[in-house]
Amino acid sequence: MRREPQLAGGQCPESCRTHLGERVTTDGSIGWEVPQRVSTPLRHGRPAEAPQRPSPIPVPLVSYGRHHQERTTAVKESVSDNRRIAVLRCNALGDYLMTTPALTALRDTFPYAEITLLAGAWHADFLSGRPSPVDRVLVVPEVAGLAGQPSGAPPQDALPRFLADARSYRYDLAVQLHGGGAASNPLVRSLGARWSIGLRADDAAPLDATVPYRYYQSEVCRYLEVVALIGAQAPPEYPELAVTAREHAVAAALLPGDGP
């Protein structure tokens, strides 16, 4: 897996900054925006107070005129009391790892919110018992056109019930981190969340606030740019994965001597 380039002091690498662009203020100048900063099966002893992290760097936001800025501001102000957040990322292990900085940013910004990952069956098994920013996993039924959806998903005829249950759950925020939005944006909109944000290609359905999907862009920075729409900030660090005690034991059994 390619390591994201880092600069001294945890700054966003120039390649990331080039792809994201700069934020254009209403007066035409260039500026940076630095936003202010119920129990489920996957919650693992998170402390009452969110852990202290290094001061986040600003992630530049792309603006497309005054209407976009006003809409983004409205979304940011309205999600400050988030209690239930749904995040769509339904593909493979490496794809999940690229979202962990953004998920951590959501966790640190909304320490008391419940974060639900809408994903595949393997995510539910993989994250069970493993410390992560995610509180619970819901397995998404088959969705026509949803690229990279893992095997083992419930059949497509289970989707209406899945969406009805999601609407009944009343998510405050739905976050689309699954591609350009051709299939994923309509899916996220169908969840019935109070607000929705995410990626959007030219031909995709709109959400309440979006950033453009650019194919040649750092994956980590791409998802940080999305969550920055609601004030969630984190450094573009190399994704980390917690290793369970059982995995340590299995590795030790495979290695000679004292093991890892």
Image: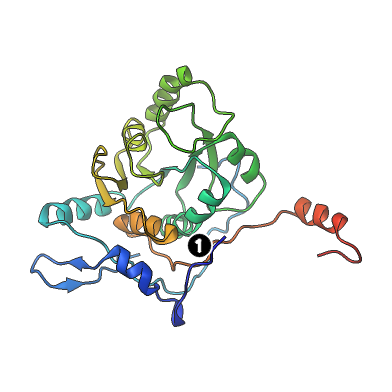
Mark 1 is on which residue type? Answer: Ala
User: Going by the image, does 46 lie left or right of 83?
Assistant: right
Report the colour scheme. rainbow
Q: Quadrant of the N terminus?
A: bottom right
Q: Position of residue 142 (x, y in %)?
A: 48, 26
Q: Quadrant of the C terminus?
A: bottom right
In the displayed orientation, state which residue is furthest to the front.
216
**Number of other residues with Cα within 10 Å of mark 1, as a class: few under 14, some 14 to 19, many 20 or more:** few
Question: The residue tagged with tag 1: helix, strand or loop?
Answer: loop
Q: Position of residue 227 (x, y in %)?
A: 36, 55
Q: Residue at x 46, y 43 (%)?
A: 89
As displayed, is residue 29 above or below residue 124? Answer: below
User: Going by the image, does 250 lie left or right of 219?
Assistant: right
Q: Nearer the viewer, residue 67 or 93?
A: 93
Count of numbered marks: 1
As displayed, is residue 90 above or below residue 23? Answer: above
Q: Residue at x 25, y 54 (%)?
A: 77
Q: Nearer the viewer, residue 25 or 62?
A: 62
User: Going by the image, does 227 lie left or right of 23?
Assistant: right
User: Going by the image, does 55 lie left or right of 260?
Assistant: left
Q: Position of residue 194 (x, y in %)?
A: 30, 39
Q: Position of residue 242 (x, y in %)?
A: 64, 57
In the displayed orientation, state which residue is furthest to the right.
257
Which residue position is annotated with label 1?
Answer: 50
In the displayed orientation, state which residue is furthest to the top.
157
In the displayed orientation, state which residue is furthest to the bottom.
8
As displayed, is residue 224 above or below residue 158? Answer: below
Q: Residue at x 48, y 58 (%)?
A: 104
Q: Nearer the viewer, residue 121 or 44?
A: 121
